[in-house]
Amino acid sequence: MFYAKHLFEAGTLGTKCNSQVIIPYKTQCYSDSADPPDKGIPLCTLKNFPYKLEHTIQWARDYFEGIFVSAPYECNQFLRIGKSYLTTLKNDNENQYELLGKLKDITATIKALRKASSEECVKMARKCFEDVHHDQIANLLYNFPLDHVNKET
């Protein structure tokens, strides 16, 4: 802007690239723009190998969301509206795996509500803890032992 010169700015940051044409007094200034926010952490990284702190935090948030927000919401909608909710759910979810996941969540939540004694809640919490903090880790270590080497590298 100081020299009133046109500028074509281009750059990269990792796998991102950008370009911007700047014409004094006609387009925004160079300092007026900013990189778009990151789209997030790939689901495969979160599901299988959350190796950075932000991955594990996001994994925990997603896990919490699924257990304590999404599943109870879907169950409440089903209990309140009934079969018409299932029709709405089917129409709104083109992805069959997502639909199946929601139906499993509804079924599991209703089954849990039927046996909602304090003893049963402790058993369910223990089972959940073992699954997340032992079984899934043991499964990963079985499939990818500590001495495992990627064949592509």
Image (tube, rainbow, N blue to C red):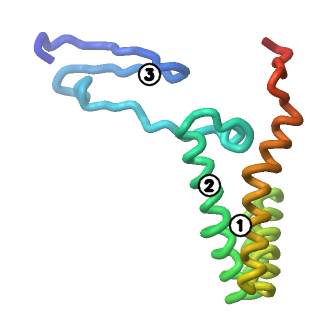
Q: Amino acid at mark 3?
A: Asn
Residue 39 position, x and y percent, is 53, 40
Question: SS of the residue at dot 3?
Answer: strand
Q: Residue at x 75, y 65 (%)?
A: 126
Question: Dot 1 corresponds to which residue?
Answer: 92
Residues at marks 2 and 1 touching, judged by CB atoms closer than 8 Å? no
Question: Dot 3 corresponds to which residue?
Answer: 18
Residue 56 position, x and y percent, is 59, 43
Question: SS of the residue at dot 2?
Answer: helix
Placement of 109 over or under 58, stated as above or below: below
Disc marking residue 51: none
Quadrant location of the N terminus?
top left
What's the distance in space between the residues labelled 2 and 1, CA to CA? 21 Å
Residue 152 position, x and y percent, is 82, 14
Question: Dot 2 corresponds to which residue?
Answer: 62
Residue that extends furthest to the left in the rendered view of this protein:
2
Q: Hey, which quadrant is residue 11 in on the image?
A: top left
Viewer-nearest residue: 153 or 147: 147
Viewer-nearest residue: 144 or 110: 144
* Front tag of 2 and 1: 2
How many other residues sit within 10 Å of disc 2, few (<14), some (14-19) or many (≥20)?
A: some
How many other residues sit within 10 Å of disc 3, few (<14), some (14-19) or many (≥20)?
A: few
Q: Residue at x 84, y 22 (%)?
A: 148
Question: SS of the residue at dot 1?
Answer: helix
Q: Earlier in the sequence, mark 2 or mark 1?
A: 2
